[in-house]
Image: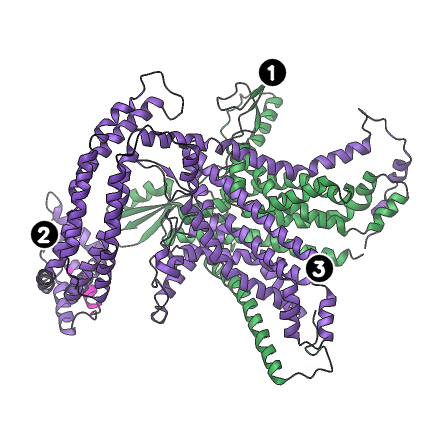
C-alpha cells in the first residue's frame, strides 16, 4: 500500500497553522464548503420535484383540452351517430364468424381440388421465378419497336427454352399431385414462354376442376351461403341512413375546428349554431329507430332460417356461438335506439366524465378522421399483463439462483455465476429488443408449430411479435435486479438462525427451506416488487417486440392471450411523441401517461420499502 | 455459508434424505445455470452474426469502412446476369451508366450502407457530457451524505428516499422530463426571445430567455446525467464509506478542518474506486435509448458534429477571428443533435424492412455497441476487484 498522502504533502502543516480566514456575509470558508455539498446533496430531491413539475406543466391541460374535444364531439352530433354505430360493430364480428363457418364448410368439399390447383400454380410460379431474367429480356425484345432482329429473337427463345428446361427439371412433385401428373406438368412447363398466353393444359384442367367443385359445394351448402349473404346485407338500409348522418356530423365538426382553430379561444367570426346544425340528426330519430327495428327483425329472421348443420364440427360450433350472441346484440341495438330520444347535444361534459373517458376508456384512437379517443385501459392492460408474465417467469429463476449461489454453490461456481448475472444488467435494452425481433420471435413461432405442443391454447401462434416474446426478454432484464436483492435478503438472515437450526439436527435442505428462506421472505417479496417496477418502466424492449397493437387483448382466448400483440404505456410515449405537435390533446395525453408511469414507479418503490421495513422490524 | 452436508455429526443422514438433497441441489443448479446459458447464448449469437461484419480475415483485420464512415443509404444494383453490386448513393448513377444495357434493377436500403462512425461519435459525446455532470453532482452529494451528514438529519432521510425513487423512475419518463425541461424550457442567451419562451430577462446587451436548447447533445447529456445520477451517488458513497474511520480521526486529531480531512485523508483513497464505479455509469448512459429519443438523437445525419458550415474567413482575418471561429466550432458540437448508437440500432430494427443487407448493418452495429458497453462494464468489474485487493485496510 502507498504511504498515506497526508504525510507526503509538506504544505499541510502550513495550511493547518494558517490563520482563519475572515467570514464573508457571516459565512466562513468551512461553512461555505459545507453549504456547497449540502446544496448538491439535495439535487436528487430537486430533480424529482422538477420531473413532476415539468410533466404536470405539459400534461395538466389535458383534461380541459380533452373536455373541449369531447364537447365538440357531442355538440356536432358525432356522439349521436356513435350510439348506434358502436353496437353495430358487433355485426361485423358475427358476420366474420358466419363467413368462417361457411368457408370451413365449403372447404370440406373443395379442399382437394384447390390444393391440387394451388400446387400446380406454385410449380409454375417457381419456374417463372427461376427464369425471371430471361423472361424479362425476351418480353422486352418482343415489345421493342422497331422489332428486334429475328436472329436475336431466336437466340433469346433458345435461352428461354434452356432456362425453363433446367428449372422444370429441378422441380419436385408435391404430395397433392400424382407422380404421373407431376411428370406431365414438368413437360408442359418446359414450354412456358412469355409469348404463349394460355396456361399449360394440365393447369387449366385443374383450374376448371376446382371451379366445378366449388360450384357444387356452393349448391350443397346453399342455405348456409344464402344465410351469410342475407345477414351481411341486413343492416344495409341502416348503414345508408347512418352514413348520411355521419357525413353531416363530420361536416359540422370540420366547420367548428375551422372556426376555432386548434386552440380553445373562441374566434371572432360567427360561432356555429349547434341547435340548428343538430336538427337533421334529431329529426331523423324516428326513421333511425325504424331502421334499427327493421335490421333486428331481418337479422333475427336470417338466424331463424339458418341451418344448424354445417360441414365441420368447428363450423357448427361457430354457428352455435353466433346464434348465442345474436340476441344480446339485437337487444343492445334496440336499447341504443331507445336511448336516442333522451340524448341531448347541449348536455355539458363534466370533468368527471372526461376523467372516466381517459382512465377507463377502452379505445386509444389517434389521427382518426372521425374522432380521437384517448382511453388508457388498452395500454395499461398491455403493460400490466406483460409485466405479470415477465415477473412470473423471472421470479422462480432469480430466487432459485439466489438460493443456490447463497447456500449451495462452491466458491468457484459463485465466482462464475455472479459476474455473468450482473453482466445481464449491462446489456442495453435496445439490444435485447433487437434479439427479440431477429431471433426469439422466429424461435417462439417455430416452436409453436411443433406437432406435440398443439395442446397449448392458441398454438400455432399468429404473430411473431407478441406479449410473451417481450415478457421473456423483460424477464431476463429483471433477473439481475431480483437476483441481487434476493441474495442480499438471504445474506441478511442472522447467522444465529442457521446455527439454531443446525443445533436442532436439521438437514441442509430443512435449514434452507424452513428457516432461511422464510426468514428472508419479505426481502424476496421486495426484490420481486422492484423487479416488477423495472419491468413496467422498460421501454425499448416492449416498443420493439410487443407488437404494438392498440387494443385490449382478447381474454376470451384463455391463457393463450399471452401470444397476442399489445401496446404499452412506455411504448406509446416513445412511439408517438416524436410525431405530435406541442400542446395538442395528443401531446398532453402522452404526458398524462408519463405522469401515471411516474406515479406507478413511486408507488412500487414505496411498497417495496414497506416490505423491507416490516422485514427489519420482524428481525429485531 | 458452505456448511458441510452433515453439520451435525450426531445425526446420521438417511439415504432417502441424502438422495432428496442431491436432487434438489441439482434442480437449483439447473435453474441457475439456465440463466447463465441463456445469457451466454445471446452473446454468442451476436458474436457469431456480428463479428464477420466488424472484422476481416485479411489485414488490417477490422472492417475499416464500417468503423470510419458515416451511415448512408445502400443501393443494390442488379445486372441482367443476376450479379449484385452494392454501392453508396453517390456512385449509384455512375455504376448504372457503366452497366448500360446490362442494368436490370435497383433497390435502396436506408441507413444500411457505409459505417457507423456518426452514431459512435454521438454516443461518445453524449456520454462525455452526461458523465461530467453526473460525476460532479454525484460525488458532491456522496461527500455530503458520507462525511458531513449526521445521523437522524431529516434532510438526509429525504435525500436517500429521493435517490431510491429516482433510481426507479422509468427511462422514458426521464425522456419526457428532458423534453419539457431542457429542450423546451432551459435558459439561453439570445438577442430576440422566441415566441415559445416561458419568460425572458433582459440583460441590456442580451436576453436570458427560457426557451430551451432544442434537441442537442447538451439536452441529451443533461437528461442522461440524471438517469445515471443514482448509480453514481450510491457507488461513490460506498467508496467513501470504505475508507477507514481511523484516517479521518487521525487527521482531525492533528487539528485539520473537516474539509482538509476530506481533501487530504479521504478523497485520495476513495477516488480510484469512484472512478471505477463511474465506468458502470458510463455503460448505463451509453445503453439508454428512451431518454435521448426526444432530446438528442436523430435517425440520420450526413455530417459529423464538428463538420459545420461556417462562413469562410477573409484571407487577412486576424488571429482573433480564427480563434473565435474555432471556439464557436467547438461549442457548436454541443448544440447539434447527433446520431447515437442505441437509437441507430432502434432505427435499423424497427423502421426499415428486414433483408440480408439490413441484417448485416444491424448485427454489425449491435456487435460493436455490445463490445463497447461490455468492455466498459467488464473493465469496471475487473478494476474494482484489483482495487479491493490493493486497498485492504
**What's the colour of chain A in the image?**
purple
Nearer to us of marks 3 and 1 is: 3
Which residue lies under the disc numbered 3? Answer: A619
Rendered residue at 38%/57% (across/down): A561
Tell me where residue A562 sits by quadrant: bottom left
Q: Which residues are magenta?
A: A161-177
Q: What's the mark number on residue A108?
A: none
Q: Which quadrant, please, contains the N terminus of chain A? A: bottom right
Tell whether A547 sits left or right of A316: right
A35 relative to A50 in the view: left or right: right
> How far apart are the two marked residues, 2 and 3, measured between alpha carbons?
99 Å
**Residue B91 at what x, y percent from top left?**
36, 42
Q: Position of residue A113 (x, y in %)?
A: 14, 65
Q: What kind of element bears circle 3?
A: helix
Tell me the residue that label 2 is attached to: A150
Question: Which residue is denoted by mark 1 in the rendering?
Answer: B205
Are there few (<14), some (14-19), or many (20+) residues within 10 Å of tag 1? few
Q: Which chain is green?
A: B
Judge whether A267 appears above or below A176 on screen: above
Q: Give the letter of the chain under mark 2.
A: A
Amino acid at each position: 500500500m502507498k504511504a498515506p498522502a497526508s504525510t507526503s504533502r509538506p504544505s499541510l502543516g502550513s495550511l493547518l497553522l494558517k490563520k482563519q480566514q475572515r467570514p464573508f456575509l457571516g459565512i466562513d470558508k468551512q461553512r461555505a464548503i459545507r453549504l456547497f455539498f449540502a446544496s448538491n446533496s439535495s439535487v436528487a430531491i430537486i430533480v424529482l420535484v422538477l420531473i413532476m413539475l415539468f410533466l404536470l406543466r405539459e400534461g395538466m391541460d389535458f383534461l380541459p383540452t380533452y373536455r373541449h374535444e369531447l364537447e365538440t364531439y357531442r355538440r356536432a352530433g358525432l356522439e349521436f351517430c356513435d350510439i348506434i354505430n358502436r353496437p353495430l360493430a358487433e355485426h361485423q364480428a358475427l358476420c366474420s364468424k358466419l363467413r368462417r363457418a361457411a368457408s370451413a364448410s365449403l372447404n370440406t368439399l373443395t379442399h382437394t381440388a384447390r390444393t391440387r390447383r394451388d400446387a400446380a400454380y406454385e410449380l409454375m410460379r417457381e419456374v417463372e421465378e427461376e427464369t425471371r431474367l430471361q423472361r424479362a429480356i425476351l418480353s422486352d425484345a418482343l415489345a421493342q419497336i422497331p422489332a428486334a432482329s429475328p436472329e436475336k429473337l431466336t437466340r433469346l427463345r433458345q435461352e428461354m427454352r434452356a432456362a425453363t428446361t433446367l428449372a422444370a427439371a429441378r422441380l419436385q412433385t408435391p404430395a397433392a399431385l400424382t407422380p404421373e401428373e407431376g411428370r406431365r406438368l414438368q413437360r408442359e412447363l418446359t414450354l412456358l414462354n412469355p409469348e404463349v398466353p394460355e396456361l399449360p393444359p394440365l393447369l387449366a384442367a385443374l383450374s376448371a376442376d376446382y371451379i366445378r367443385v366449388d360450384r357444387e359445394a356452393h349448391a350443397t351448402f346453399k342455405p348456409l351461403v344464402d344465410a351469410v349473404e342475407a345477414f351481411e346485407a341486413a343492416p344495409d338500409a341502416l348503414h345508408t341512413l347512418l352514413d348520411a348522418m355521419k357525413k353531416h356530423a363530420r361536416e359540422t365538426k370540420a366547420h367548428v375546428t375551422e372556426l376555432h382553430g386548434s386552440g380553445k379561444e373562441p374566434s371572432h367570426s360567427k360561432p356555429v349554431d349547434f341547435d340548428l346544425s343538430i336538427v337533421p340528426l334529431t329529426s331523423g330519430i324516428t326513421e333511425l329507430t325504424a331502421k334499427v327495428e327493421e335490421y333486428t327483425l331481418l337479422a333475427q329472421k336470417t338466424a331463424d332460417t339458418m341451418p344448424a348443420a354445417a360441414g365441420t364440427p368447428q363450423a357448427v360450433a361457430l354457428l352455435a356461438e353466433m346464434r348465442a350472441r345474436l340476441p344480446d346484440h339485437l337487444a343492445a341495438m334496440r336499447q341504443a335506439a331507445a336511448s336516442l330520444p333522451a340524448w341531448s347535444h347541449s348536455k355539458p361534459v363534466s370533468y368527471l366524465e372526461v376523467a372516466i373517458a381517459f382512465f377507463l376508456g377502452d379505445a386509444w384512437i389517434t389521427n382518426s378522421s372521425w374522432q380521437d379517443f384517448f382511453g388508457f385501459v388498452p395500454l395499461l392492460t398491455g403493460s400490466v399483463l406483460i409485466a405479470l408474465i415477465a415477473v412470473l417467469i423471472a421470479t422462480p429463476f432469480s430466487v432459485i439462483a439466489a438460493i443456490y449461489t447463497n447456500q449451495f454453490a462452491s466458491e468457484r461456481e459463485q465466482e462464475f455465476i455472479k459476474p455473468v448475472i450482473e453482466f445481464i444488467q449491462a446489456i442495453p435494452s435496445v439490444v435485447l429488443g433487437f434479439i427479440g425481433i431477429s431471433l426469439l420471435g422466429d424461435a417462439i413461432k417455430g416452436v409453436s408449430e411443433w406437432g406435440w405442443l398443439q395442446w397449448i391454447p392458441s398454438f400455432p401462434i399468429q404473430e411473431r411479435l407478441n406479449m410473451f416474446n417481450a415478457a421473456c426478454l423483460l424477464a431476463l432484464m429483471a433477473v439481475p435486479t431480483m437476483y441481487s436483492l434476493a441474495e442480499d435478503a438471504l445474506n441478511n438472515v442472522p447467522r444465529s438462525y442457521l446455527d439454531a437450526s443446525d443445533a436442532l439436527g436439521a438437514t441442509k435442505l430443512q435449514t434452507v427451506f424452513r428457516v432461511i428462506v422464510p426468514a428472508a421472505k419479505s426481502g424476496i417479496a421486495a426484490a420481486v416488487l422492484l423487479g416488477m417496477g423495472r419491468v413496467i418502466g422498460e421501454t425499448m424492449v416492449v416498443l420493439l417486440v410487443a407488437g404494438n397493437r392498440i387494443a385490449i387483448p382478447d381474454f376470451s382466448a384463455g391463457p393463450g392471450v399471452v401470444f397476442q400483440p399489445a401496446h404499452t404505456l412506455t411504448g406509446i410515449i416513445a412511439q408517438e411523441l416524436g410525431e405530435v405537435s406541442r400542446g395538442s390533446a395528443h401531446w398532453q395525453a402522452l404526458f398524462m401517461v408519463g405522469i401515471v408511469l411516474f406515479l406507478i414507479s413511486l408507488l412500487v418503490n414505496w411498497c417495496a420499502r414497506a416490505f423491507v421495513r416490516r422485514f427489519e422490524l420482524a428481525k429485531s | 455459508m458452505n456448511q458441510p452436508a452433515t453439520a451435525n455429526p450426531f445425526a446420521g443422514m438417511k439415504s432417502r434424505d441424502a438422495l432428496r438433497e442431491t436432487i434438489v441441489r441439482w434442480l437449483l443448479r439447473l435453474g441457475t445455470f439456465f440463466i447463465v446459458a441463456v445469457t451466454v447464448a445471446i452473446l454468442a449469437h451476436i458474436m457469431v452474426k456480428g463479428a464477420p461484419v466488424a472484422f476481416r480475415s485479411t489485414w488490417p483485420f477490422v472492417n475499416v469502412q464500417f468503423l470510419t464512415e458515416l451511415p448512408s443509404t445502400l443501393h443494390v444494383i442488379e445486372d441482367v446476369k443476376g450479379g449484385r453490386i452494392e454501392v453508396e448513393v453517390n456512385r449509384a448513377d455512375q455504376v448504372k451508366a457503366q452497366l448500360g444495357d446490362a442494368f436490370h434493377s435497383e433497390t435502396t436500403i436506408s441507413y444500411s450502407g457505409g459505417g457507423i462512425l456518426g452514431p459512435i461519435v454521438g454516443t461518445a459525446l453524449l456520454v462525455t457530457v452526461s458523465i461530467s455532470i453526473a460525476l460532479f453532482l454525484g460525488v458532491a452529494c456522496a461527500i455530503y451524505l458520507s462525511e458531513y451528514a449526521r445521523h437522524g438529519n431529516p434532510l438526509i432521510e429525504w435525500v436517500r428516499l429521493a435517490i431510491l425513487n429516482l433510481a426507479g423512475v422509468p427511462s422514458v419518463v426521464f425522456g419526457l422530463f428532458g423534453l419539457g425541461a431542457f429542450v423546451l424550457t432551459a435558459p439561453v442567451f439570445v438577442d430576440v426571445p422566441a415566441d415559445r419562451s416561458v419568460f425572458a430577462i433582459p440583460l441590456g446587451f442580451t436576453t436570458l430567455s427560457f426557451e430551451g436548447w432544442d434537441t442537442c447533445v447538451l439536452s441529451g447529456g443533461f437528461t442522461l446525467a440524471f438517469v445515471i445520477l443514482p448509480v453514481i451517488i450510491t457507488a461513490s458513497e460506498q467508496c467513501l464509506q470504505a475508507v477507514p474511520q481511523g484516517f479521518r480521526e487521525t487527521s482531525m486529531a492533528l487539528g485539520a478542518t473537516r474539509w482538509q480531512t476530506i481533501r487530504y485523508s479521504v478523497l485520495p483513497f476513495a477516488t480510484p474506486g469512484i472512478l471505477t464505479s463511474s465506468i458502470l455509469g458510463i455503460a448505463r448512459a451509453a445503453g439508454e435509448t428512451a431518454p435521448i429519443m426526444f432530446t438528442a438523437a436523430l435517425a440520420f445525419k450526413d455530417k459529423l458534429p464538428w463538420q459545420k458550415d461556417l462562413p469562410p474567413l477573409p484571407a487577412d482575418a486576424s488571429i482573433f477571428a480564427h480563434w473565435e471561429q474555432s471556439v464557436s466550432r467547438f461549442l457548436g458540437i454541443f448544440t447539434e443533435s447527433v446520431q447515437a448508437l442505441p437509437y441507430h440500432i432502434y432505427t435499423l430494427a424497427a423502421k426499415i424492412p428486414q433483408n440480408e443487407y439490413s441484417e448485416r448493418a444491424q448485427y454489425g452495429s449491435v456487435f460493436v455497441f455490445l463490445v463497447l458497453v461490455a468492455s466498459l462494464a467488464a473493465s469496471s468489474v475487473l478494476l474494482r476487484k484489483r482495487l479491493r485487493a490493493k486497498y485492504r485496510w
